């Protein structure tokens, strides 16, 4: 998925960058910077599996915070994975929404109505 100011997640909604976003907030939330200066966060969505075997929520912000990507990827980092049609979707979707709610509360992203 390409960088964008808004990201639409099928069966979930559209998210945009919150105008109040701050770089230090990303670092407080556990985002890491890669070699290109982008901010990357990966969170496992299957707590009963080892982290390296779990599907993950992956969020990447450009270094200037002008655009972002939001994907659910496989354990190998290849995606996207549709978590809304899985047999174990209740726990996975709950954890997915928990992480996104935290980002909304910290003014990183906003869900569009």
Image (tube, rainbow, N blue to C red):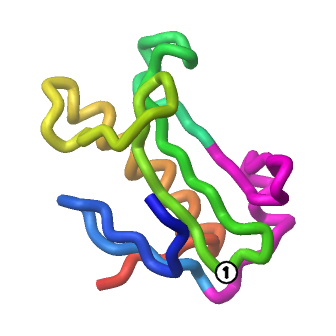
Q: Is 27 inside the magenta-drawn segment?
A: yes
In the image, taking residue 85 as reference, residue 56 lies left or right, namely right
Tell me if residue 47 comes above or below residue 86 in the rendering.
above
Query: Which residue in the rendered view is the most extreme toward the bottom?
Result: 19
Determine the residue positioned at 48% across, 57% down: 70
Residue 21 shown in magenta = yes
Q: Nearer the viewer, residue 109 or 80?
A: 80
Q: In the image, residue 64 lies at what x, y percent?
A: 78, 76
Q: Residue 2 location in percent, x, y?
A: 49, 65
Give neighbour class at mark 1: few <14, some 14-19, many 20+ (Cα, 10 Å). Answer: few
| Above/below status of 18 relative to 72 | below
In the image shown, does 29 or 10 lie closer to the viewer? 10
Count how many numbered circles sit on residues in the image. 1
Label 1 belongs to which residue? 66
Q: Residue at x 79, y 68 (%)?
A: 63
Q: Residue at x 31, y 38 (%)?
A: 81
Q: Which part of the image, by quadrant, shows the N terminus?
A: bottom left
Left or right of 32? Residue 61 is left
The location of residue 13, given as percent across then percent down, is 28, 69
Q: Looking at the image, which is closer to me, 108 or 10?
A: 10
Q: Residue at x 14, y 25 (%)?
A: 87
Q: Position of residue 59 (x, y in %)?
A: 57, 53
Residue 1, above or below 66: above
> Looking at the image, which is closer to me, 19 or 75?
75
The quadrant of the rendering that contains the C terminus is bottom left
Q: Dot 1 lies on which element?
A: loop
Q: Quadrant location of residue 72? A: top left
Residues in magenta, as a range: 19-41
């Amino acid at each position: 998925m390409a960088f964008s100011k808004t990201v639409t997640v099928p069966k979930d909604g559209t998210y945009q960058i919150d105008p109040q976003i701050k770089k230090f907030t990303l670092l407080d939330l556990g985002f890491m910077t890669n070699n290109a200066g982008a901010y990357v966060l990966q969170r496992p969505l299957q707590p009963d599996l080892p982290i390296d075997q779990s599907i993950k929520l992956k969020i990447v912000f450009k270094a200037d915070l002008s655009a972002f990507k939001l994907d659910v990827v496989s354990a190998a980092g290849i995606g996207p994975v549709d978590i809304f049609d899985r047999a174990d979707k209740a726990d996975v979707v709950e954890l997915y929404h928990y992480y996104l709610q935290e980002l909304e509360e910290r003014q990183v992203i906003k869900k569009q109505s």
